Amino acid sequence: MEIALFLSQDYRNELQIFSEHLERLKLLVIRFLVFSEDSNTSPSEYLSEAKELLRSVVPDAEFTVGTDASFAELNREFPDISGANTVTFSLNPQVHAFDNDTLMENCEGQFDAVKSAKVMARPKNIVVSPITLKPRGNPDATSVETNLSAHKLPDSADTRQRELFTAAWTVASLKNLIVAGAYSLTYFKIAGCEGVMEHSSGTEYPGLFNSKPGEFYPVAHILADLREMSGGIVRKSCSTNRLKIAVLEMGVVQNVALIANLTSQEQKVNLEFSEKYSNEKLAVSTVRTLSDETIELARQNPKAFRNSSVKVDLSKIENRELVLTPYAVVRLDIGVISSE
């Protein structure tokens, strides 16, 4: 688990109570994010007390400082990081504009945010947590939203969460953040209108968020693909137009590439490979496409979708061309053909 602690001026008592609960529950915790309810970035005394009380309970956990808000708040009020393992900020693409194209273009800025944070926090690693499609709140707000009801989606929810758009956006986000050198990334909630799947009991907002009980959103398959790439190394790959096509390639036993169409228009992609793949040996062992044609299968029967890959020999495809419909994501498992 990654646990975010929001502490008040009574932080010593709060941490004492929390440590007792933690010791009883025997949770496996990888990281504590130490925040303050009263300031945008972590006070050093909160971190010191957290380490003293929690390290004996979870000795291998990291302690992280920074902000639960965006990079802007981290930049304005950079905390004392001397006692921390890592530094964090959260991220979302909707602050000043909300259209599809702007959200996709925002992924390029995510690269710069991590690069800048790495310079500021050197030699500490950067944790980006959480990454969401909309802001979860206003760090400068003077009151808390309380008029939540089933007749209105929360301000933090976006109906695009269950659409192909978010799957493609996540591929572009992952590519930029990983290449920028982020140490750890935390995406979305687990379930609900801000998650990667729907609750088994169904949506809390019928008529406003049109998911079905237990539905898997397309973005869940992107994260599942990453899970299958666990232990792999990110390979050098690029698109000649990064605002239209995102490419994330990782090598485990063989290379796996996710290619995402970041636009509302059909895109044609011509694949080019490094010299280590000769024309005679190059092949793609399997291809699976997340698109308008397969989205319902991906949502309602995720196991069948994940088993729907087809074998393709690239040498038999003219110009090695793939056609990606709007916001489609193609997974390629890249292999070689026997020379015999």
Image: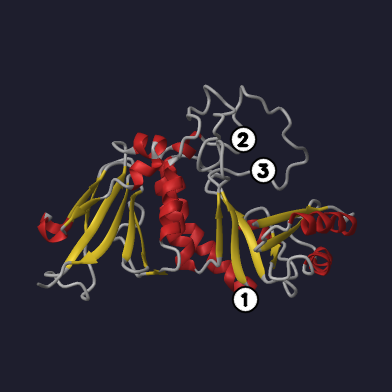
**Front residue (pair 222, 129):** 222
Q: CA distance from mark 2 to mark 1?
A: 35 Å
Colour scheme of the rendered structure: secondary structure
Q: Is residue 303 left or right of residue 13?
A: left
- How crowded pointer 3 is (Cα within 10 Å; few <14, some 14-19, many 20+) is rated as few
Callout 2 secondary element: loop
Q: Is residue 15 above or below residue 301?
A: below
**Which of disc 1 and disc 3 is earlier in sequence?**
1
In the image, what residue type sits under mark 3? Gly
Q: Quadrant of residue 185?
A: bottom right
Residue 281 coordinates in the image, percent (x, y): 15, 70
Say if mark 3 contacts mark 1, CB within 8 Å. Answer: no
Question: Does the rendering let one see residue 75?
Answer: no
For the residue labelled by badge 3, is the local secondary structure a helix, a strand or a loop?
A: loop
How far apart are the two marked residues, 3 and 1, measured between alpha carbons? Answer: 28 Å
**Residue placed under numbered mark 3 in the picture:** 137
User: What residue would you read off at disc 2?
Assistant: 155
Q: Amino acid at mark 2?
A: Asp
Question: Label 1 belongs to which residue?
Answer: 122
Q: Pick whichever of labels 2 and 3 is earlier in the sequence.
A: 3
Quadrant of the drawing holding the N terminus: bottom right
Residue shown at the point (54%, 42%) measured from the top left: 195
Given contact means CB atoms under 8 Å apart, are the residues at marks 2 and 3 in contact? no
Please state the horizontal and vertical placement of residue 92, each as a whole percent of the image.
55, 49
Residue at 61% over, 55% down? 90
Could you say which quadrant of the image residue 12 lies in? bottom right
| Visible residue check, residue 166 | yes
Secondary element under disc 1, as helix, strand or loop, is: loop
Amino acid under disc 1: Arg
